[in-house]
């Protein structure tokens, strides 16, 4: 019986430590946000170095997008596009999916600081 209590307590401690580690802010794996407008790179932001939240407003061709940036994450706060898919995507903090506002031709991609290129592998 004492053995079972020991393992239950140990499991509980591991679960609590894991939950705390997941909630604490740390170095994000994708630390640079690259903002493209009409295929041109317009801004690069190190989201791992943000100390205070801020916004970037992009206006061109009669369209407007507002991008919100906080430590380790970025989102399209508002856009005057008809569908608003980019706004509903919400915050992103990993480099898997970019934020794309197709009608306004705005793309936000996240990449590692040390990635250097988009090449995953070279096969000879």
Image (spheres, rainbow, N blue to C red):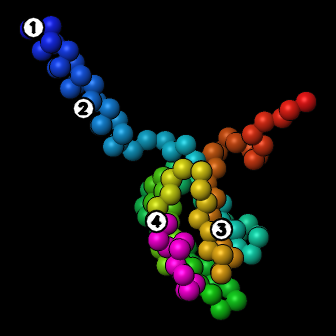
Tell me the tag on residue 90: 4
Task: Name the residue beneath numbered marker 2.
Answer: 16
Sequence-wise, the earlier of marks 1 and 2 is 1
Sequence-wise, the earlier of marks 4 and 3 is 4
Q: Are marks 2 and 4 in contact (CB under 8 Å)?
A: no
Image depth: mark 1 or mark 2 in front = 1
Res 44 seen here: no
- Residue 82 falls inside the magenta stretch: yes
Image depth: mark 3 or mark 1 in front = 1
Q: Is residue 104 left or right of residue 19?
A: right
Q: Are marks 3 and 1 in contact (CB under 8 Å)?
A: no
Q: Residue 47 location, x and y as percent? A: 53, 54
Q: Secondary structure at mark 1?
A: helix
Residue 7: image quadrant is: top left
Magenta stretch: give its range.
Answer: 79-89
Task: Name the residue beneath numbered marker 3.
Answer: 107
Task: Name the residue beneath numbered marker 1.
Answer: 2
Q: Residues within 10 Å of mark 2 (few under 14, many from 20)?
A: few
View extreme (right): residue: 124
């Amino acid at each position: 019986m004492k053995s079972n209590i020991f393992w239950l307590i140990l499991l509980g401690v591991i679960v609590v430590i894991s939950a705390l580690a997941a909630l604490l802010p740390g170095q994000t794996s994708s630390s640079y946000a690259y903002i493209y407008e009409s295929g041109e790179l317009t801004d690069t932001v190190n989201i791992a170095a943000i100390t205070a939240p801020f916004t970037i407003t992009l206006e061109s061709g009669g369209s407007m997008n507002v991008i919100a940036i906080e430590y380790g994450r970025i989102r399209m706060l508002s856009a005057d596009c008809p569908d608003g898919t980019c706004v509903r995507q919400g915050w992103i903090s990993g480099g898997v999916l970019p934020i794309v506002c197709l009608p306004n031709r705005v793309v936000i991609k996240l990449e590692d600081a040390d990635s250097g290129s988009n090449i995953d592998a070279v096969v000879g």
